[in-house]
Image (spheres, rainbow, N blue to C red):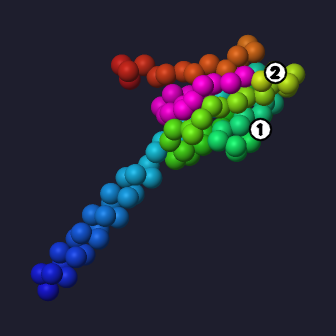
Amino acid sequence: MPGHRRARMVAALAVVALAGCTDAGGLEITNETDARIEVNVDDDVTYVEANGGVVYLDLGCTDGDVVVTLEDDTVLTVAGPVCPPDRIVVRNGAAELVTPDSDG
């Protein structure tokens, strides 16, 4: 029996370790403009309504750049990879990478 308990314990620890790896954090993109924007994150295109936002849950870091297309077809590129807790805010014709204060 002790061998079976040890095997179960090792399996349980492996599951916990893998679960920790999937908690990558969500990438937040906020649209502070008065028009809908198109956001391309790792070839996943999403539309974000005016004065709205989107969160890519458990994405972690992007594979590459994040591309934002404004209503007037202006293309803005945020150099990647972009990683949470940093977030992207689109306003005044620009896409800005915002890093939270380390003070909390």
| Residue furthest front as drawn | 64
Which residue is found at the position 73% from the left and 28% from the top? 68
Q: Position of residue 8 (x, y in %)?
A: 25, 75
Magenta residues (range):
76-90
User: Where is 71 relative to 49, above or below?
Assistant: above
Q: Quarter of the image holding residue 93?
A: top right
User: Where is 55 relative to 88, above or below?
Assistant: below
Q: Is residue 11 left or right of residue 87?
A: left
Residues at marks 2 and 1, CA–CA distance in whole angstroms: 15 Å
| Residue furthest bottom as drawn | 1
User: Where is 25 relative to 18, above or below?
Assistant: above
Which residue is found at the position 57% from the left and 22% from the top? 97
Task: Give the residue at mark 2.
Answer: 74
The image's mark for residue 47 is 1
Q: Quadrant location of the N terminus?
A: bottom left
Magenta span includes 55:
no
The amino acid type found where label 1 is placed reads Tyr
Q: Nearer the viewer, residue 30 or 41?
A: 41
Which residue is found at the position 37% from the left and 52% from the top? 20
Mark 1 element type: strand
The amino acid type found where label 2 is placed reads Thr
Can residue 34 be seen by looking at this rendering? no
At label 1, counting other C-alpha atoms closer than 10 Å, the crowd grade (few under 14, some 14-19, many 20 or more) is some
| Residue furthest top as drawn | 92
Which residue is found at the position 74% from the left and 41% from the top? 46
